[in-house]
Image (cartoon, grey):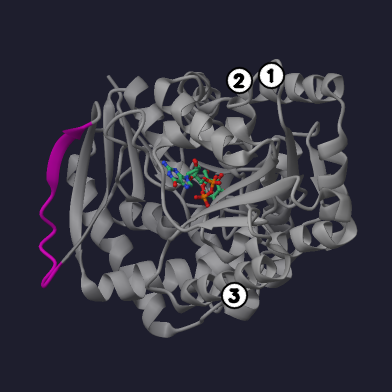
Amino acid sequence: MSRLIVVSNRVNPPTDRGEGTAGGLAMALAAALREYSGMWFGWSGQTIDEYTGKIAVQKVGGVTVATVDLEDQDRQEYYNGYANKTLWPLFHYRVDLTAYERSFDEGYKRVNTRFAEALAPLIAPEDFIWIHDYHLIPLARELRRLGVKNKIGFFLHIPWPARRLMATLPKHRQLVEALFEYDLVGFQSEDSVTAFEDYVVQEAKGTVSRERRASAFGRSTRIGAFPIGLDAEHFVEAATSQEAEMMQGRMRSSMAGRKMIVGVDRLDYSKGLEERFLAYEQFLADNAEQLEKVFFLQIATPSRDEVEAYQEIRARLDGVSGRINGAYATVDWVPIRYVNRGYRRDELAGVYRAGAIGLVTPLRDGMNLVAKEYVAAQDPKDPGVLILSRFAGAAEQMKDALIVNPFSREDVSDAIKRALAMPRPERIKRWEALVDGVKTDDVAAWRDSFVAALRETAAPALQVVSGD
Ligand code: GDG
């Protein structure tokens, strides 16, 4: 029987339903793997003095995981370097933060080779291989070099950038060419697929067929949009669990009748937190009658804190939140509760449920699962309002949210005002449409549609076509 082998940078299945780690990927993949017999391969997160290629296999939360340790140089050049200082900012349109260093390039290639060499012997002829995210774009090429002929799919969790941004990356053609070693390349949104097609046609002088087969570099691959979803059923359950209710009760008693606006994000510059704080400040300035009637809770879980850009955004947020609170707080009201720690998943569900507004305003986001979690956690009889950035992949699906431009303080401020005043029947109508989508397009639908599309890709997997 064919197995599914999932590969991602980190392998961290949650130990139980409540204790999720920060990061949408872990939850989604663990749910996918429990359904299929198979294995999850990746980095343990540990570093050792000298790389050995030794694989540790264990069962975690019902999932078989196989991990390797890397060297500190790998962590610096591959993980903190090429992945998080080069590709992450570039793919999130932050060319100003993008570092282009040759040593990062070498580290990226080295780790992808190491992954391929460790993984290849574990692959049986009938297995399907599903590789995740920007850390591992060249992995199929390395596996093919070792003679792996299996079907290999790739899914990009973050946005694909516009062609002219992509062209700022040294050796961008090599990186894109590596994607043509896959049988299927999946993106989160139509916006990303279109940007990729634009690169193929304009930059690589290739073609894209009506069936979405992209051809360039003498090869071809299937491409498509596979919007990721939530483990929705479990999240809805989590929102009414005892832990969630306790959390909601705790929130309610501290609210003193005030309405809460809530934001939950990894502390990352792509999430638009500074712009969000400033938009909320604008709202306070524009709506004096709302002072002391509402407050904003932002949970921002620290992330990638070895990278300077993350230390900088954290310091900026400390400054901006402090300044706004200094300007507006009264003896018994603080306008922004800014929290830098993580919570259990079921506790988070309780926090979402207590929020009259879910404020999700990333400047760029592949999908954004927080938007979907906020919707899934609402009380059907009295749901809150989702305010969502048009630049999150989720905006293509969640059209009944209040869609905003996160770069415009006035736009976000107006949406907050509108959401606070929204009559209950309109809130219910919008929420019903949103929750329908969240439940239908859940993580199982995502997994099944990707795996089905991978199975259906034409054999032979590598097909030589015209184009340069
Ligand atoms: C990438 C893409 C794409 C946050 N704080 C805590 C916590 N979280 C959880 C949230 C949510 C997840 O982290 C964040 O997921 P997002 O989708 O919002 O964003 P990224 O981490 O940037 O994920 C993104 C995603 O991959 C999946 O493809 O949607 O576009 O950037 O699940 O709940 N979880 C817990 N405690 C916290 O304090 N337990």
Front residue of this view, candidates 54 and 399: 399
Say if 210 sits above or below 409 in the image.
above
Instruction: Look at label 1 and name its amino acid.
Output: Asp
Please state if 267 lies on the left or on the right of 59 as rendered: right
Say if 83 sits above or below 299 in the image.
below
Q: How far apart are marks 1 and 2 (CA)?
A: 5 Å
Residue drawn 67% across and 55% down? 362
Mark nearer the N terminus (1 vs 3): 3
User: In front of the other: label 2 or label 3?
Assistant: 3
Say if 378 sits above or below 96 in the image.
above
Instruction: Look at label 2 and name its amino acid.
Output: Lys
Residue position marked by numbered label 1 in the rendering? 436
Q: Is mark 3 on a helix, strand or loop?
A: helix
Quadrant of the rendering where the N terminus is positioned: top left
Please state if 439 lies on the left or on the right of 35 as rendered: right
Q: Distance between the residues labelled 1 and 3?
A: 40 Å
Quadrant of the rendering where the C terminus is positioned: bottom right
Q: Tell whether label 2 touches label 1 (CB within 8 Å).
A: yes
Q: Which mark identifies residue 421?
A: none
Q: Tell whether label 3 touches label 2 (CB within 8 Å).
A: no
Residue found at the far front of this picture: 331
Queried whether the magenta region covers residue 53, the answer comes back as yes
Residue position marked by numbered label 3 in the rendering? 319
Magenta stretch: give its range. Answer: 48-60
Front residue of this view, candidates 194 and 92: 92
Residue position marked by numbered label 2 in the rendering? 439
Mark nearer the N terminus (2 vs 3): 3
The percent position of residue 324, horizontal first and vertical second, equals 69, 68
The percent position of residue 183, horizontal first and vertical second, equals 49, 41
